[in-house]
Amino acid sequence: MKKRGFTLIELMLVVIIISVLVALVVPRLVGRSQEARFAAAQAQIEAHLATALDLYELDNGIYPSTEQGLAALRKMPSSPPVPPNWKGPYIKKTPKDPWGNPYNYISPGVHNTQDYDLFSCGADGIESSDDIVNWEVAEE
């Protein structure tokens, strides 16, 4: 009975081919996770939270105050202004941004004076130019 196996040259050739493929693919993927987090935060702000806040305002005629915050979407606030017609919960849980930080909510807003400012401070966790905000139109 003759044993069959791979020679050292065949194994080295496979390792070299895999290394070349990795060298070609990895640079294309670097930075994609940050892009995905940015897109997720933007979608959360512009769709999920905006819809919940608009439903709250539709039922009650006002947005939650800054002090009540986004928690007012989950549990009826007891601090003034108490919503007259709260029909929540409007969301199942108060979300965090993709970096694990709470979203910032100000009502009435500094930038959106008629309703609210909603934003994530991004990866650095501090207010700066990399923030994801609801008052600027995203560049496409």
Image: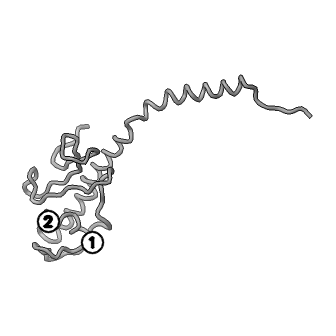
Vertical relation: 4 (above or below) 104: above
Residue 47: quarter of image: bottom left
Closer to the camera in the image, 106 or 44? 106
* Type of the residue with mark 2: Glu
Residue 12: quarter of image: top right
Instruction: Decide if residue 115 is on the left or right side of residue 51.
Output: left
Vertical relation: 73 (above or below) 115: below
Closer to the camera in the image, 110 or 3? 3
C-alpha separation, residue under disc 1 versus residue under disc 2: 18 Å
Q: Position of residue 69 (x, y in %)?
A: 18, 64
Name which residue lies at 43% across and 35% down: 29
Instruction: Decide if residue 110 is on the left or right side of residue 46.
Output: left
Identify residue for label 1: 89
The mark total stands at 2
Instruction: Decide if residue 29 is on the left or right side of residue 114.
Output: right
Badge number at residue 69:
none
Instruction: Decide if residue 96 is on the left or right side of residue 18.
Output: left
* Type of the residue with mark 1: Pro
Vertical relation: 26 (above or below) 99: above
